[in-house]
Image: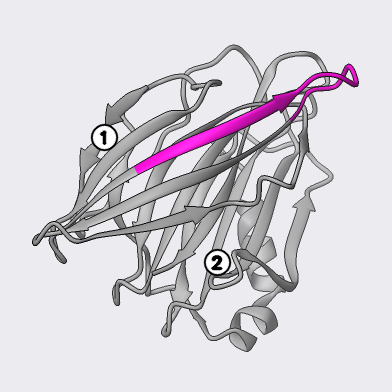
Amino acid sequence: MMRRGLYLSGIFAILSAATLPAGDVASFVDLGFSEDGDTYIFAQYGIEEKTLFPWSNLFIVDVPQNDFVPGGRFTYTHNEPIGPVQDGAGALMHLISNNAVMTRRYRLDFLIKGIPVFLSLQNGQNPEGETVEFRDFRHELNYNAQLLPTYDNSSGIIRSSFYIDVKQTDKNGMERRFRVGTPEIKRANITSYTIRRVLINPQNTCMIFVIEMTRTGADGAPDIRYMVEALKM
């Protein structure tokens, strides 16, 4: 399935979760890069549907390795429900403030945000995969990215994985190809993957694919979570 998103170059975009039946829906937060682009930090947060407890996850990514740095995953769930008009972002602030040592260690800068070059405008998921096209106007580069998922239900519990084939074409027609992802990792109860956003760092040395995952929650309703795949250009 081919789709084109909104082409963006250096403008801020807000990503909303797709409209789904009741479930636990996370919000994705781009927090920034290190100056050399070799480390990236992002987060997600939300509210537990049944308890109304706010929660958050914080992740620090080694971009060249496309993996978390050692000790680079953090989680927090508050032990009381949120009040009126609150959205759970306080749980994320708690994680950030409590892990400032790690952000300093990896020289992460919250002012070096990712530059969006693709933003999905499509609601819903694509269980069979997708192909998206986008353009980096600043560097005159065209991209074609194909997400290829695999699902295994032989054990009675669905386990899935994916990778992304990326083709970059410059203004002279020269092509470069990349493969992003770790298809060896099998994730339990994940029923679909969708490319929701693509970011590059200001130096154009790396690209971040923001992947929305739909998982089956404890009550059978779909929950939304986010992950990233990092590509060193």
Q: In this rendering, is residue 127 above or below 38?
A: above
Main secondary structure type of the part rendered in magenta = strand
Asked if the stretch drawn in magenta spans residue 155, the answer is yes
Residue 13 visible in image? no
User: Neighbour class for label 2 at 10 Å: few (<14), some, many (≥20)?
Assistant: many
User: Neighbour class for label 1 at 10 Å: few (<14), some, many (≥20)?
Assistant: some
State the image coordinates of residue 150 (x, y, percent, origin top left): 65, 30
The three-letter amino acid code for the residue at tag 2 is Ile
State the image coordinates of residue 112 (x, y, percent, origin top left): 37, 74
Which mark is drawn over residue 138? Answer: none
The three-letter amino acid code for the residue at tag 1 is Gly
Asked if the stretch drawn in magenta spans residue 125, the answer is no
- Left or right: 176 in relation to 64: left
State the image coordinates of residue 151 (x, y, percent, origin top left): 70, 25
Q: Which residue is mark 1?
A: 5
Quadrant housing residue 72:
bottom right
Q: How is the image coloured?
A: one colour
Q: Which residues are magenta?
A: 145-159
Q: Quadrant of the C terminus?
A: bottom left
Q: Which residue is mark 2?
A: 41
Q: Quadrant of the N terminus?
A: top left
